[in-house]
Image (spheres, grey):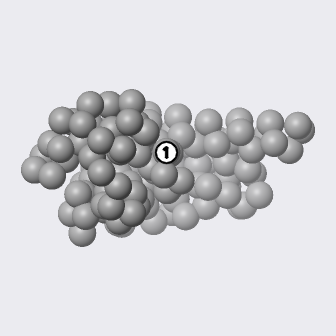
Amino acid sequence: MSWWNYVQRITRRSSQHEIARRLGISPSSVNRWKTSDPKPESVRALAVEYGRPVPEAFVAAGYMEPGDVEGLENVEAAAGQTGPLSVKEAAEKIWALEALPEETRRLLILELLERAGRDEAAQTG
């Protein structure tokens, strides 16, 4: 599946203007996704805004291969520390994916830490 097909599927075929508005980027940036690779920060923003797993979006954008996600199945569970991986262990697994650009690994770990913080706040709130 191409990046643009993925975008259309998860946004339920929203207009480029609507996607841009929700992400806080220009419609021309969204339009460029039809023919070129999106920036990693835009991939992350789209996944977060539309409630999709960030690794899934990175695979769709071509920054990760489906096999890179193996072993990260418990990352979302680790964010709430309900699965077998701790947040630290999940972050270490992400960092060990040396085939990914450093910026991509940093964004994935940031997402993991943000989810862990939200889950912790919800549990104590």
Q: Secondary structure at mark 1?
A: helix
Q: Which residue is mark 1?
A: 49
Q: Please rate how many residues cluster around mark 1, counting C-alpha atoms within 10 Å: few if below 14, some from 14 to 19, many from 20.
A: few
| Left or right of 54, for residue 39 | left
Residue at 71% over, 61% down = 84
Where is residue 28? Give x, y as percent: 18, 35
| Left or right of 100, for residue 23 | right
Q: Quadrant of residue 115?
A: top right
Residue 26 in view: yes
Residue at 25% over, 64% down = 5
Residue at 71% over, 39% down = 118
Residue at 32% over, 31% down = 25
Considering only vertical position in the picture, is 69 above or below 43? below
* Front position in the image: 27 or 7: 27
Where is residue 102? Give x, y as percent: 34, 34
| Left or right of 62, for residue 89 | right
Considering only vertical position in the picture, is 83 above or below 113? below
| Type of the residue with mark 1 | Glu
